[in-house]
Image: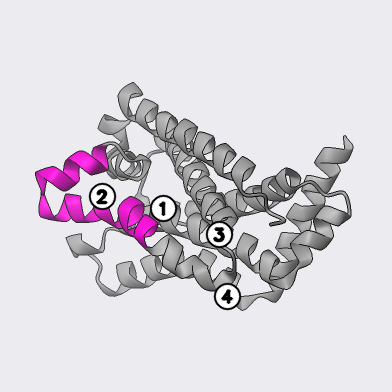
């Protein structure tokens, strides 16, 4: 294993240990899965309790919030500067944090599977769409984490982004607004919601391509922001 990979793995393990000591991180990762099970059990048969709503929010909101908060908190504690001075490159740190959020979010997203009654043949498509959504949300969180100066600024910076990417597709679906539906159509989260709500018919090349374009655009924005505003600033 190369030195770079060892450092990324070390950051990944560090984040897991920190998460086990932090009830807040565990709470956020389990919030929507637990809520989905509770609501489904209490209001079984009610169309308004579709667990896919909670899954969509879990993928669109949690990686964004946690990634941004982790990076910002490291800035507050000054531990990020210590890591950088210890020859851990900022990009290695970001990959370590991002992989931690990515893996944990995939695992907790799979907790929804028993609620979805999904045929086994569609599991690979489900996982692909979920992974694309989590990658996009994690990169969004990293962009916010790099931009903000401290943890106290995370909520203010992430709220409008969360509303756009997580809530607009849900509102558009519920209201049937043509304007909001047009916006949602171009968002990875909008395509994510459309696909997983009917994966048998909506898993198409066009929809996956829109999610991929979102991923490329977000990655490009991240590289630009990262080059303009270093983590150690």
Category of crowding for the residue at label 4, using alpha-carbon neighbours closer than 10 angstroms: few (below 14), some (14–19), many (at least 20): few
Residue 70 visible in the snapshot: yes
Q: Position of residue 203 (x, y in %)?
A: 33, 30
Please report whichever mark, 2 or 1, sits nearer to the chain's N-terminal start: 1
Q: Determine the secondary structure under disc 1.
A: helix
Query: Would residue 161 appear left or right of 181 to someone viewing this image?
Result: right
Q: Position of residue 195 (x, y in %)?
A: 31, 38
Q: Is residue 178 magenta?
A: yes
Callout 2–callout 1 Cβ contact below 8 Å: yes
Query: Would residue 168 appear left or right of 189 to someone viewing this image?
Result: left
Snapshot quadrant of residue 126: top left
The residue at which mark 1 appears reads as 60
Please report whichever mark, 4 or 1, sits nearer to the chain's N-terminal start: 4
Q: Which residues are magenta?
A: 160-185
Distance from Cα at disc 3 to Cα at disc 4: 14 Å
Residue 52 visible in the snapshot: no
Category of crowding for the residue at label 3, using alpha-carbon neighbours closer than 10 angstroms: few (below 14), some (14–19), many (at least 20): many
The residue at which mark 3 appears reads as 68
Q: Determine the secondary structure under disc 3.
A: helix
Please report whichever mark, 3 or 2, sits nearer to the chain's N-terminal start: 3
Distance from Cα at disc 4 to Cα at disc 1: 18 Å
Snapshot quadrant of residue 55: bottom left
Relative to 175, is 195 above or below?
Answer: above
């Amino acid at each position: 294993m190369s030195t770079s990979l060892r450092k990324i793995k070390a950051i990944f393990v560090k984040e897991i240990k920190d998460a086990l000591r932090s009830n807040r991180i565990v709470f956020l990762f389990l919030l929507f899965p637990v809520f989905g099970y509770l609501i489904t059990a209490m209001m079984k048969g009610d169309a308004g309790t579709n667990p896919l709503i909670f899954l969509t929010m879990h993928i669109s909101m949690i990686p964004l919030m946690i990634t941004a908060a982790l990076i910002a908190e490291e800035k507050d504690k000054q531990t990020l500067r210590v890591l950088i001075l210890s020859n851990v490159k900022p990009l290695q740190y970001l990959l370590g944090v991002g992989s931690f959020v990515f893996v944990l979010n995939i695992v907790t997203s799979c907790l929804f599977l028993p609620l979805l009654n999904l045929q086994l043949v569609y599991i690979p498509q489900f996982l692909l769409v979920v992974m694309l959504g989590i990658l996009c949300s994690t990169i969004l969180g990293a962009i916010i984490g790099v931009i903000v100066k401290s943890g106290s600024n995370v909520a203010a910076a992430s709220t409008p982004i969360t509303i756009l990417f997580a809530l607009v597709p849900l509102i558009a679906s519920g209201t049937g607004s043509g304007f909001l539906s047009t916006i949602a159509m171009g968002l990875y989260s909008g395509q994510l919601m459309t696909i997983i709500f009917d994966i048998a018919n909506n898993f198409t090349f066009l929809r996956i391509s829109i999610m991929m374009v979102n991923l490329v655009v977000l990655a490009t924005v991240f590289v630009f922001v990262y080059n303009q505003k270093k983590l150690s600033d």
